[in-house]
Amino acid sequence: MKKQGKIWGETSEIFNNKNVSVHYLKIRKGGYCSEHFHLSKSNIFVVISGELKVNTFLRKNNTEIVDSTILKTGQETTILPQETH
């Protein structure tokens, strides 16, 4: 398993191919990832313990709309390709 330290915690890559990558994330309390998107991969977030806030950013007519979802233990959400999060 490939492990990588991040400013917000650490990520361990469990699986990766052309369409899917699976990572186990350990996020420090208050940690956050920079705004980004993936061209062809979806992100599925499943909370094993604690809470996770996932923001998605939509831009229309020079206006940014932020949609925030708070996930608790056992909950999940999917971010589609090219969706900024």
Image (cartoon, rainbow, N blue to C red):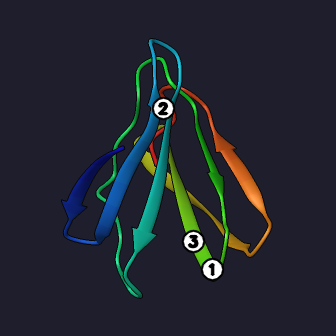
Q: Residue at x 75, y 75 (%)?
A: 73
Q: Nearer the viewer, mark 1 or mark 2?
A: 2
Q: Which mark is residue 53?
A: 3
Residue 15's disc is 2
Position of residue 38 in the picture relative to residue 44 (left or right) = left
**Up-down relation of residue 46 to residue 17 (above or below):** below
Q: Residues within 10 Å of mark 1 (few under 14, many from 20)?
A: some
The one of 36 and 63 positioned closer to us in this rendering? 36
| Total numbered labels placed on residues in the image | 3
Q: Is there a contact, CB below 8 Å, between mark 1 and mark 3? A: yes
Pick whichever of labels 2 and 3 is earlier in the sequence.
2
The residue at the far top in this view is 18
Circle 2 SS class: strand
Instruction: Say which quadrant the N terminus sits in.
Output: top left
Q: Looking at the picture, how far across and down is residue 62, in whole percent?
A: 40, 42
In the picture shown, does residue 1 fall above or below 68? above
Residue bearing mark 1: 51
Residue at 62% across / 53% down in the picture? 45
Give the mark, 1 or 2, whose residue is nearer the N terminus.
Answer: 2
**Which of 64/79 is in front?**
79
Inspect the image, locate mark 3, and give the three-letter code of the amino acid beneath it: Lys
Q: Amino acid at mark 1?
A: Glu
Q: Is residue 29 above or below residue 64?
A: below
Amino acid at the residue labelled 2: Phe
The x and y percentages for residue 19 are: 52, 16
**Pointer 3: residues within 10 angstroms few (<14), some, or many (20+)?**
few
- Measured Cα–Cα span from mark 1 to mark 3: 7 Å
Q: Can you give x and y, in whole percent of width and height, for residue 13 in the image?
A: 39, 42
- The residues tagged by marks 2 and 3 sit, at their Cα atoms, a distance apart of 24 Å
Quadrant of residue 37 in the image?
top left
Please rate how many residues cluster around mark 2, counting C-alpha atoms within 10 Å: few if below 14, some from 14 to 19, many from 20. few
